[in-house]
Amino acid sequence: MVAVMEPQEIDDEEHEQVLERVAAVDVAKASGMVCTRVPHQSRPGKRRTRVWPVDATTNAVLELADHLVAEGVEKVTLESTSDYWRIWFYLLESAGLDVQLVRAQDVKQAPGRPKSDKLDAVWLAKLTERGMLRPSFVPPAEIRRLRDYTRLRADLTCERTRHYSRLEKLLEDALIKVSAVASSLAAKSVRDMLEALIGGERDPKILASLARGRMRAKHDRLVQALAGRFDDHHGELARLLLDQIDTLSAQIGRLTTRIEELIAAIPPAQGIDADGTTGPAAGHGKNAPVLPAVDRLDEVTGIGRGGAQAIIAEIGLHMSVFPTAAHLVSWAKISPQTIQSGTRSRAGHTGKGNPYLRGLLGEAAAAAGKTDTFLGERYRRLVKRRGKLKALVAIARSILVIVWHLLDDPAARYHDLGAGYYASRVDKNRKMRNHVRQLEALGYTVTLTQAA
């Protein structure tokens, strides 16, 4: 007897609609090959295809935009590598056209692709009118502007970290082992010691006496660690590195201030007071129904205020772009692929997603895994049977799902389920029976007595 399954109806995505009037641009650095496909005026049922090159300059692209609007083009597809697509996307979008950006890798996977700029453009137009291209996510202008600041801040932070690594190597060359005693070279106590070394002080006891706070308890270890061979050339190089670190720290501070101003100026990121007032200063009261977006994300375990700002810059504030949390997770490449062939299914790789977002989520997951919270307990349960890397990806996915819900519903708030959530849902009777059965299988007779 063969079971008959009911047919499953699958709705088309928005980008999979069949269109009549389309255009495509194969973008290069200095120009783009443009192709339009519209219904033929004198031959019903046929298509008219036109291909021509357009310079990648503002005036030329604006003229192209006017022409495409006059042609009644419904969608424009851009294929590009690097950042050469920006002038085309920004200007065509400002003219009111529906523009989508697609990855070259996705286009190459479709069979029948020729290889010349002219035929590439024609092929892109044909795929566009049949709805066979999946567009990339391009956030609105205010989020793109914010993203420029947050990404530069992330890059400068990485550069500052590299300078600290160079400073540590320099100290190792000078036989100074202070990094083995102090938690970080950025500590104020370490900075005072380095300034004294650069100034000519070489007595380990005097240097160790500069320790502040809890580091004073490590005085004897500091004396041993600071007894090295710090020469004048070490001091000169250390001065250069510290000056670079100070400059980068000042720039990072300026960027953070500007990022806070930009986010406060975006209406969807603002909060709402109890009396309905909204604005940059709203939403901070005790009974505010809607917190500012950064404050809502800051409540999530592992996400700090800077991380919340960067996440907003990467995924935006309008979750209508991602209909469900699963769409966002899939776009970020945080969930493994499911590869099915016949009756066999296996998990594939997560793929390469947005590197800035993946880095932020990885840091948040690592921080959450060390806490006594629901996410921390979830990490500790997963790491035992799946390993550290897979457990971190799982926690990063959970964090991104939480972020989607908080941004999709501005009135939502994050509430931690607690580290005891899993234990509270355990069926005690079932667990007891399993343990008794295992002991009986080993030849024991089990008698259970209720503990006092």
Image (tube, grey):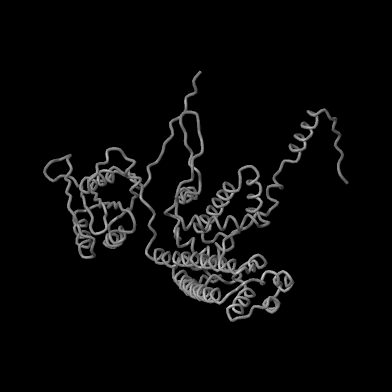
Left or right, 378 with reference to 5? right
In percent of the image, x 41 and y 64: which residue is there?
143
Percent position (x, y) of residue 30? 24, 59
Residue 308: % across, % down: 52, 63
Q: Residue at x 62, y 53 (%)?
A: 375
Q: Using the image, determine if residue 206 lies above or below residue 322.
A: below
Is 320 left or right of 398, judged from the image as shown?
Answer: left
Residue furthest out toward the top: 1
- Identify the residue shown where x is 30% and y is 62%: 90
The one nearer the camera, 130 or 120, is 120
Question: In the current view of this chain or complex, which residue is farthest to the left?
Answer: 42
Total label count? 0
Q: Is residue 222 left or right of residue 49?
A: right
Residue 69 percent across, percent down from the top left = 22, 57
Is residue 233 shown above or below 118? Answer: below
Name the image quarter holding residue 62. bottom left
- Res. 178 image quadrant: bottom right
Q: Nearer the viewer, residue 367 or 388?
A: 388
**x and y percentages locating residue 184 in the rendered image:** 62, 67
Asked whether 225 or 55 is in front, the reply is 225
Q: Nearer the viewer, residue 278 or 178?
A: 178
